[in-house]
Amino acid sequence: RTVAELDDALTHCRACPRLVEWREEAARVKRASFADWDYWARPVTGFGPADARVLVVGLAPAAHGGNRTGRMFTGDRSGDVLVRALHDVGLASQATSVTRDDGLELLGVRFTAPVHCAPPANKPTPQERDTCRPWLERELRLMRPTLGSVVVLGAFGWQALLPALAAAGWSVPRPRPVFGHGVRVDLAPAASAPAALRALPVFGCYHVSQQNTFTGRLTPAMLRGVLAEAAHAAGL
Ligand code: SF4
């Protein structure tokens, strides 16, 4: 099937009871500043062209960010930081990401996450991560023809992504490479992979959460640096 069909199916998933409850609870209680919003309150799909060259992998939607707007990295501080940096390096049509109909286009880039529903305290359980992994595996398989690099935001995404990449046809070394900001790992195609599959550079980057951006652990320059490197590696 196509990425669009996959995304459509994903929005109906209710496989994680705790997350279904949390995403719907956030829509009922709301945040005062969003009182007039009709929250999305469903799984948030990947966003960006299906034939993207660069995949940016986050963690999970925020209860009052993506879970409200229905688009990944949209309507919260993490999205502000990420989309501004993408725009600065020529990978987004505009510098802001506010609502799902604000006209933002990602240029050769797609966002996704290992967990597609908002978790309490932004912390999915290992079981929820594993339950959601088949969606990521399918997305990776569908993107294989054009995928040229991956940027992983944070250790949770890194740990979730590597098994999914292994399932999608790349050879992941044992022991698994360790996450770090600025780490680059080049994964060769597995012996069983289709002949056309190319090596895949995977880049680690601190997550764009406020914990990192407010404290200066992740600066805009550091983020731009990883994004530009990943774009270059993917031929953008
Ligand atoms: Fe389904 Fe993933 Fe949401 Fe769990 S986190 S309910 S597997 S979409």
Image (cartoon, rainbow, N blue to C red):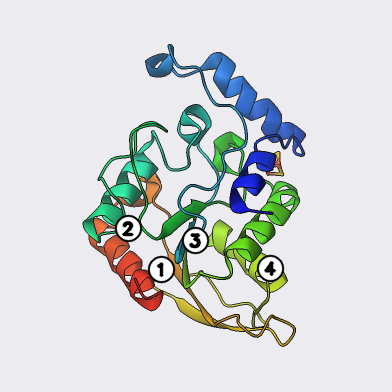
Between the residue at mark 4 and the residue at mark 2, the CA separation in whole angstroms equals 26 Å
Q: Nearer the viewer, residue 48 or 37?
A: 48
Q: Give the image location of residue 50, x and y in percent.
A: 52, 56
Q: Give the image location of residue 109, x and y in percent.
A: 41, 58
Q: Amino acid at mark 1?
A: His
Residue drawn at x 25%, y 45% is 95
- Label 3 within 8 A of ligand 1 by Cβ: no
Between the residue at mark 4 and the residue at mark 3, the CA separation in whole angstroms equals 22 Å
Q: Nearer the viewer, mark 4 or mark 2?
A: 4
Q: Nearer the viewer, mark 2 or mark 3?
A: 3
Mark 3 residue crowding within 10 angstroms, few (<14) / some (14–19) / many (20+): some
Disc 3 or 1, which lies upstream in sequence?
3
According to the picture, the residue beneath numbered tag 4 turns out to be 163
Q: Nearer the viewer, mark 3 or mark 1?
A: 3
Between the residue at mark 4 and the residue at mark 1, the CA separation in whole angstroms equals 20 Å
Disc 4 or 2, which lies upstream in sequence?
4
Disc assigned to residue 181: 1
Q: Nearer the viewer, residue 231 or 152?
A: 231
Secondary element under disc 4, as helix, strand or loop, is: helix
Secondary element under disc 3, as helix, strand or loop, is: loop
Q: Quadrant of ligand 1?
A: top right
According to the picture, the residue beneath numbered tag 3 turns out to be 51
According to the picture, the residue beneath numbered tag 2 turns out to be 218
- The answer to whether marks 1 and 2 mark residues whose Cβ atoms lie closer than 8 Å is yes
Q: Is residue 7 placed above or below 144 in the rendered structure?
A: above
Q: Amino acid at mark 3?
A: Asp
Disc 4 or 1, which lies upstream in sequence?
4
Residue drawn at x 71%, y 46% is 128
Q: Give the image location of residue 77, x and y in percent.
A: 35, 39
- The answer to whether marks 4 and 3 mark residues whose Cβ atoms lie closer than 8 Å is no
